Amino acid sequence: MISDFQPVIGLEVHAQLLTTSKLFSTAGTTFGAEPNTHTTPVCLGFPGALPVLNARVVELAIRTGLALECRVNEKSEWSRKHYFYPDSPKGYQITQYEFPICEWGGVTLELAGKRVRIRRIHIEEDAGKSVHDAADGLTLVDLNRVGTPLLEIVSEPDLRSADEAVEYLKILRDVLVSIGVNDGNLEEGSFRCDANVSVMRKGSEVYGTRCELKNLNSFRNIKLAIDTEIARHVDVLEGGGTIAQETRLFDVNRGETRSMRSKEDAQDYRYFPEPDLPLLLVTPEEIARAKATLPELPQAKRRRYVERLKLTEYDAGVLTAERGFSELFERCQAAAGVEPKKVANWFIGEVSRLLNESGVKPGEVKFSPAQFAALLMAIDAGTISQNAGKEVFGEMFHSGAEPAEVIARKGLAQVSDTGALEKVIDELIAANPPNVAAYRAGKVQVLGFFVGQVMKALKGKGNPKVINELLEQKLKG
Amino acid sequence: MKLELAQVRHVAKLARLSLTPEEEARFLTQLSAVLEAVDALASVDTTGVPPTTFALSTAAHVRPDEVRDELDVDVALRNAPQKVGTSFAIPRVLE
């Protein structure tokens, strides 16, 4: 039974850094370009071509280390990892082996309230792309991706279920996206994950033999693959068998994992220090600078929205899902003198809808926070109705028009002026004695008739709240 | 340190080298001599000396994150024995 076993999971994430050029080469990092249009002699492994480190990569690695509460090492080193495959022309990958740039951090899972330790974060270069089924008997090689900078983020085996693994990955992705080091795209492979999975008998303190799962390109597949692999381990062990340590590929169509034989004897990578690159030295000043520019992280921001702005967990989650969106929300929220929940409703509703429809980025909207505040105050004061507010906002969004100007031009202001309303009401009461008598005899639903008549006389622009109050007062006599 | 013949064969396999028996014997002698030379360093007392992986302690030269000097795709492919479109084409490699 699965319940007799405890799964143990550790994750390795490869996150592509958001740079314009590669780690050691001045070629560009564009995704989806024509094959081999972004290379230099360094990417192609030409003899004599030497790597030169991209300064931005180091900055982004330091940022990541700090955001994930790691120690940033002032001295780390580059190593060569040797293997032969056509996607790596020089026959080795430059990576960090014994001394990575960051070590010993972690993230906190909110559901379980538990800490997942991060053992290390190191910088390495990506490989190219091989396509096996495009031409008969041939493999086609595209070296555009060779040398793209990656961070490998390695967790300790602290995760105990597929759900915990997915939560950890989502937190990690949110952090990386929010600090601007990664675009968080699993499908395009800029955020990739390998999972080390094993099981042990409940109560045991000795980990079972682990298998490494590859090809996990969505959160759904990660959960499926891990659950499938856990079930396989339990099956084998229950049947008296043993698990072989190996790399396995998740086949989403068959819902199973299977052994990657090609990886079996490839574990001897003959690492040695990279002679073409000196040590990677980071100064305390660089670390301090990165710390000073680190934005508020998603988990802290959500907590602040719930605790200080009194928003629900759901609202806080939606508002903080994207950094530009939450920044716009906060600027509008600060400008508007109404309760945060009202601003939040607008953002989750109309603002979000129009952003999606138009494809405009939150940082590039035409309306200003002051204009947004003016609109909300007009609604709050009853100058215009909630529905008219949506119409006004639509114009503000598309043209940057002043809300007061739109309200005046479209004649959207509600009549809230009691003098004007009283005049209309008095006339109606005088013209409809039978209905007035009916109301006074207890037939209160006649009120609806009068509200309708007042609205008709004002062409729908009366303030319903004020009209109701005045009518009740006058009908009662 | 004297190598075993099996170790020479293992290293040759990892390096994708196909050696004749004569070459294996020659490299066994040569590689053993290299390792013996390195072993001589072990006689130095390094107590209290941190491991050194690079002779210079200067920081790496860094460059700004800018794209320049990309190769024209025709130049990049000039040495390709075979190509399809703008891809290098090689005998099929199965994963």
Image: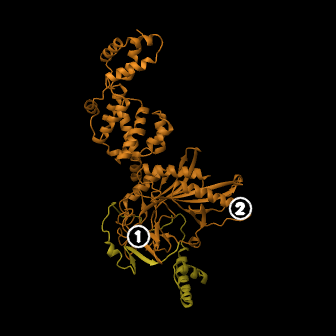
Chain colours: A orange, B yellow
Quadrant assignment for the C terminus of chain A: top left
Mark 2 vs mark 1, CA separation in Å? 43 Å
At mark 2, the secondary structure is helix
Q: Is residue A183 above or below residue A422?
A: below
- Closest to the observer, A74 or A464: A464
- Closest to the observer, A291 or A353: A353
Q: Chain of mark 1?
A: A
Image spot of residue A6 (x, y percent): 67, 53
Query: How crowded is the residue under tag 2: few (<14 C-alpha within 10 Å), some, or many (20+)?
Result: some
Q: Earlier in the sequence, mark 2 or mark 1?
A: 1
Spot the residue most to the right: A240
Q: Amino acid at mark 2?
A: Leu
Q: Amino acid at mark 1?
A: Leu
Q: Is residue B7 above or below residue B68?
A: below
Q: In screen coordinates, is A187 left or right of A374?
A: right
Residues under numbered marks 2 and 1 in contact, where contact means CB atoms less than 8 Å apart:
no
Image spot of residue A425 (x, y percent): 34, 15
Image spot of residue A112 (x, y percent): 59, 45
Question: Which residue is label 2 attached to?
Answer: A237
In the rendered image, residues at marks 2 and 1 fall on the same chain = yes
Question: Which residue is label 1 attached to?
Answer: A143
**Residue drawn at x 41%, y 32% as measured from the top left:** A342
Q: Chain of mark 2?
A: A
Q: In screen coordinates, is A293 left or right of A72?
A: left
Q: In screen coordinates, is A308 left or right of A467?
A: right
Image spot of residue A186 (x, y percent): 47, 57
- Closest to the observer, A134 or A117: A134
**Residue drawn at x 48%, y 77% as measured from the top left:** B92
